[in-house]
Image (cartoon, grey):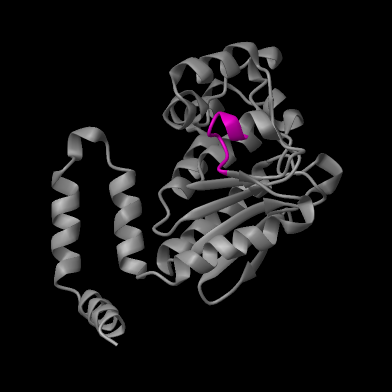
């Protein structure tokens, strides 16, 4: 299996596992990611995405890309599944060690939270292969790091190391390799302490285009104001404060 799945009560850990190909994303991986999304759409849980063998994903599978046609490009094989990952109800955490290039970088960009190791190398070398980064980089990357820096990365094809990625805001923190997954779980633990519906509504608001604000917050907040969980949590807070 190219994607190893570990299910827990409040989270799922998905590990890209094609060590012989440095976890390059092939059609089997895309199909497995769609199956994972279907499960998490049905039963929302936080998703931790990572890779095996000290590599996140060294790109899309070039042998398959070379044979794809214009019709394949229009199908958006990788773009479609990355959009689905980005739109999952609960947060997605990318724990990135080593290479995250091409399609691997675009998978990382689709996450809500990105943490990495100092050995990170992340970027999009697609133009050197005669194609463009067409699975989200041209619109997600400017949203994450700004248009000027995204243009430099995508037009030159250079990859950032861990310290550069941290300075540019592409990742939120760096951790030693042997602490990376534990840190991802610590983030998931913090998420798990919060109200799941409030977390889902926050993610939905974050993903709403600017033209939809503030209307989206008002509607989502209206639903939460009527929820029993809001009343329970606020009552518990006031009782603790008054002790």
The residue positioned 53% from the left and 38% from the top of the image is 109
Quarter location, residue 236 = bottom left
Q: Quadrant of the C terminus?
A: bottom left
For the view shown, which residue lies furthest in the right direction? 20
181 or 26, which lies in front?
181
- Point out the image quarter for the N terminus: bottom right
- Give the x, y percent position of residue 216: 18, 48
- Residue 136: image x %, image y %? 49, 31
User: Residue at the bottom extreme?
Assistant: 243
**Is residue 60 among the parts visible in the rendering?**
no
The magenta stretch is: 166-172
Nearest the eye: 58 or 237: 237
Magenta stretch contains residue 55: no
Q: Is residue 171 magenta?
A: yes
Horizontally, residue 228 falls left or right of residue 182, namely left
Q: Is residue 128 above or below residue 205?
A: above
Where residue 86 appears, x then y in whole percent?
Answer: 45, 46
> Is 187 rendered above or below residue 151?
below
Q: Which of 96/74 is in front?
A: 96
Which secondary structure dominates the residues rendered in magenta? loop
Q: Horizontally, is 102 left or right of 119 in the view?
A: left
Residue found at x 50% / y 35%: 79
Image coordinates for residue 205, horizontal then vertical, percent: 28, 48
Q: Who's the residue at 51% across and 48% down the image?
A: 113
């Amino acid at each position: 299996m190219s994607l190893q799945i570990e299910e827990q009560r409040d989270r799922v850990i998905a590990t890209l596992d094609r060590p012989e190909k440095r976890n390059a994303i092939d059609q089997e991986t895309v199909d497995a990611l769609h199956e994972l999304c279907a499960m998490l759409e049905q039963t929302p849980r936080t998703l931790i995405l990572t890779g095996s063998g000290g590599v996140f994903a060294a790109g899309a599978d070039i042998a398959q890309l070379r044979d794809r046609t214009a019709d394949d490009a229009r199908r958006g094989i990788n773009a479609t599944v990355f959009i689905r990952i980005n739109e999952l109800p609960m947060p997605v955490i990318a724990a990135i060690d080593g290479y995250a290039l091409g399609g691997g970088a675009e998978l990382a960009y689709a996450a809500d939270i990105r943490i990495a190791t100092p050995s990170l190398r992340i970027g999009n070398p697609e133009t050197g292969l005669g194609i463009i980064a067409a699975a989200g980089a041209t619109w997600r990357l400017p949203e994450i790091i700004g248009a000027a820096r995204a243009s430099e990365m995508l037009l030159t094809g250079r990859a950032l190391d861990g310290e550069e990625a941290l300075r540019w805001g592409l990742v939120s923190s760096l951790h030693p390799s042997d602490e990376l997954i534990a840190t991802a779980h610590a983030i998931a633990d913090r998420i798990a302490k919060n109200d799941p519906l409030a977390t889902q509504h926050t993610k939905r608001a974050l993903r709403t285009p600017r033209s939809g604000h503030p209307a989206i917050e008002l509607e989502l907040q209206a639903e939460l104001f009527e929820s029993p969980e809001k009343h329970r949590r606020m009552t518990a807070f006031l009782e603790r404060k008054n002790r």
